[in-house]
Amino acid sequence: MKTPATTKPGLHPRNRHRNRYDFAALQQSCPALTAFIKAGPHGDSTVDFADPLAVKALNQALLAHFYGVLQWDIPEGFLCPPVPGRADYIHHLADLLAEGNEGKVPTQASVLDVGVGANCIYPLIGQHEYGWRFTGSEIDADALRSATMIIDANPGLSRMIRLRRQKTPNAIFPGIIHKNETFDATLCNPPFHDSQEAARSGSERKRRNLGQHEKGALNFGGHEHELWCEGGEVAFVSQMINESKAFGRQVMWFTSLVSRGENLPAIYRVLQEAGVEKVVKKEMAQGQKQSRFIAWSFMNDAQRARWAATRFK
């Protein structure tokens, strides 16, 4: 019988989730997880990843055990993110910021999370791991309310994380980045699908892959605005690139996940047309799943070095 690997291949070296889950320790940090523990195919402990309540309980345990977030919940139907993959984005972003700071990850960074979501996951991980301050933007009032509740329920987070409502439905940066305000980086997990039907099909495919065959609501995998926009990932990232031109002296690095590698050529064309000075691609992997984020800057190497020397020392 093949035994499961003790480490998860591909994750960043600083990722706290490179080893298999220690369910005994996680249950100590979050007793509610106990109700969802079951025996895996090799006799080890696991949870049913097709059960949204089990996945949410696992997230609660991971956030409590590794990141000191003792109170975390999201309303039914909102995206429940995989914590290890979200942590990987934060760690690779830290490496990008370190490249311009003599190899040292800055502890004074200010980061904008575009679409912070009901789960507030990137700020929760980033402030704990590196002491960064976050601004989270969000278009959905219910998601913003949920993120606010998480911040308010955990002492100390309100000093590290602030939230802003995007009041213009078709805007990303305008109205969020204020005049004379600066950020060392932005990050974003853009909508993946290009239509409601594609999002629904994707959710059904996810169910089948997890062994959950009955048809259900789209919210198995997130609210519609979290999953799709017209034109999909390429359109959203392209809009972000075009909007970023107006803020090229206020932000050192703009970044975004790109879930499909075949979308990169179209995105690179938009970056070239926008006249960016520098483009970086950071590859990420979790087991068999491949992902990456792209980063672009309107500052040249010397300008970014001066920025880092001023802000990170």
Image (spheres, grey):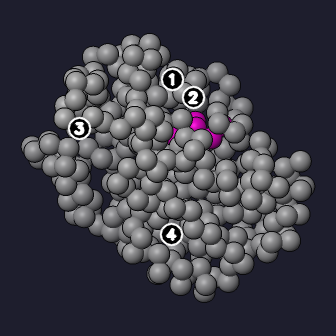
- Give the residue number, with chain letter if any, for mark 4: 237
Q: Is residue 113 left or right of residue 276?
A: left
Give the residues drawn in magenta, as a range. 121-127
Residues at discs 1 and 2 in contact (Cβ within 8 Å): yes
Marking on residue 2: 3
Q: Nearer the viewer, mark 4 or mark 2?
A: 2
- Residue 141 visible to an observer of this rendering: no
Of the image marks 4 and 3, the number of the one nearer the N terminus? 3
- Seen from this angle, which residue lies furthest left? 214
Percent of width and height locating residue 303: 85, 70
Q: Is residue 141 left or right of residue 192?
A: right
* Disc 4 packing (10 Å; few <14; some 14–19; many ≥20): many
Of the image marks 2 and 3, the number of the one nearer the N terminus? 3
Amino acid type of the residue tagged 3 in the rendering: Lys
Taking the spot 35% from the left edge, 38% from the top edge, the residue there is 5
Marking on residue 67: 2
Q: Main secondary structure of the magenta part?
A: helix
Residues at discs 4 and 1 in contact (Cβ within 8 Å): no
Circle 1 — which element?
A: helix
- Give the residue number, with chain letter if any, for mark 1: 64
58, 195: nearer the viewer: 58
Give the CA separation, mark 1 to mark 2: 6 Å
Of the image marks 4 and 2, the number of the one nearer the N terminus? 2
